[in-house]
Amino acid sequence: MRWIADDPSPDDRAELQRVLAGAMAGSAEAVADLADRLSAPLAFGTAGLRGPLRAGPAGMNLTVVRRAAYGIGSFLLGSGERDGVVVVGYDGRRRSAEFAADAAGVLAAQGFSVLLSSRAHPTPLTAFAVRELGAAAGLQVTASHNPPQDNGLKVYLRGGAQLISPLDTRIEQAIAAAPAARSIEVNETAGGPLVLGPVVTGSVRPWPDSIVDDYLARAATLARTGHTGTGVGVALTPMHGVGGEIAVKALHLAGFPTVHVVSEQAVPDGGFPTVPFPNPEEPGATDLLLALAARTDAAVAVALDPDADRCAIGVPTGGSWRMLTGDETGALLADHLLRHLDRTAHPDPLVATTIVSAELLRSIAAGYGARYDETLTGFKWIVRAGDGEGTGLVFGYEEALGLCVDPDRVRDKDGISAAVLACDLIAELAAAGRTIGDRLDELARTHGLFVTGPLSIRVADLSLIPQAMRRLRSSPPASLLDDPVTESTDLLPQTDGLRWRTDRVRVVVRPSGTEPKLKCYLQVHADVPAAADDATLAALRATATGDLDRLRAEVAQIVGL
């Protein structure tokens, strides 16, 4: 009742009143729903808040967003950022624009000069704007590739990198100390465009018109091999998200004017009507894209997730099409970028990936004389690889389709810039009469085969995940694929994860940070003779792929969910 009285949204108040009435009438379902909504406030996870759109402290709603914005503002004021600019953006999900406007108004009332996007934009643009404008912080209302019932609030700090511990704890404490939502002042007065110079505090203004143009111009520079042109047709889907228009413009500027967009998924729609889970990794999510690619005789298929920070690549192979894995894409783009890297601008380059991604990147980096680092999962760690500040970072990726291909300007994953780089690679290969398959074979002969794949187990009861982790910690497997386990490592306290190894297999198990899933990351390694012919390499790859399938079934049985 206290929550209802404090809620500034009439719709949210009415929603919670209906649940409360059902609980008071004795409905067991309503009692359970009410208990779940009030069990605990949303906690900062992957660089911010994320949760279901629903009234109550355990959901994303206007009260939670308003108090979160107030807590973030209090944190910034306490960190000496009183005169700083704060950038606020939002995607096309349900209530994103409402939440962004309210958060901007709260921050303006606290004295900040707030730049609020005038329309829904991809998340990478907010990360770019924070860095480009020298802002104190950035907020993006998004739940990325989560199901349609979710939304979230992502936080960037000065420099454009995501929030990390222990700063997230300090913000959580500031949010907990925030006053009642209906008593928080909201300055909803919007001024004219910002004129860079003296900071005008306590105002909400639109983003500078130059931000999008500057981002597009920068993304276009990633096509640097000189093989662009009309010969590389692109099929693209924004998956009902906000990346379509920006991606098409970026590809045109980069020299790829032939872009066909999946019409059924071209317009932003927070209901995601053609995909139950708007994630390019999910089975069936790219069916419409690959069908379009085949119809238009495209050279490459590009799938962005709804906020365009992730990018999946599809390629023709053997008369059909397939989507590359995140590890394949990461290896291909890292090799391409290092192959053409300006060593004058980057004399001591660093590349990075995570403890759950394929170990191929380590060998690729060594081949180019680049530094390599392996971090915890998440781009908040990848962009801080090496010395904790990401000094010298030129490329980072994670297997879940996250690619950071221009960390000097976007210090986060960026699906649009990655799409430009992928098209540049394919154009270069096509000019030489070669394909992505040829380049993958070349990498295998040079570095060996690293065949990877996920096992994601979605649960309805979140308590099953910590139960499974406790059981696996107490009883790890003694063998995998009939080989003895030579390493069984508990990754605590750095992260809640487990790693098992044999001479040719690696398995990492961890709870998802954004979805109700237990995720298992599987890798099978095989040496490849440098002189292996095509038939030998194909046989080795088929064997490793079969071993991966057997490993997936075995690990599923071990996990037992």
Image: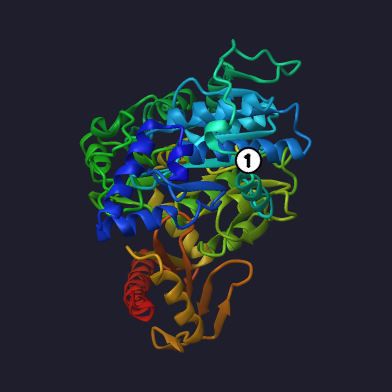
Query: Does residue 345 appear in this view?
Result: yes
Residue 421 appears in the figure: no
Q: Residues within 10 Å of mark 1 (few under 14, many from 20)?
A: many
Quadrant where the N terminus lies?
top left
Toward the viewer: 469 or 527? Answer: 469
- Residue 261 horizontal/vertical position (percent): 30, 30
Locate the C terminus and report the quarter of the image it occupies: bottom left
Q: Secondary structure at mark 1?
A: helix
Q: Residue at x 49, y 20 (%)?
A: 118
- In the rendered structure, the answer to whether residue 383 lies left or right of residue 348 reads left
For the point 46% across and 67% down, the residue is 449
Res 263 → quadrant = top left
Q: Residue furthest right?
A: 80
What amino acid is found at the position of numbered circle 1 in the picture?
Gly
Give the residue displayed 29% in from the left and 38% down from the top.
271
Q: Is residue 357 left or right of residue 82?
A: left
Q: Is the residue 102 above or below the residue 537 in the image?
A: above
Residue nearest the viewer, comparing 350 with 308: 308
Q: How is the image coloured?
A: rainbow
Write down the quadrant of residue 53 in the picture: top left
Which percent across, then down, holds residue 429? 44, 43
**Looking at the picture, does residue 525 appear above or below residue 38?**
below
Q: Is residue 74 above or below residue 172?
A: above
Residue at left 34%, top 44%?
Answer: 149
Location of mark 1 (residue): 71
Residue 39: x percent and y percent?
45, 58
Q: Position of residue 306 (x, y in %)?
A: 39, 38
* Left or right: where 236 falls relative to 475: left
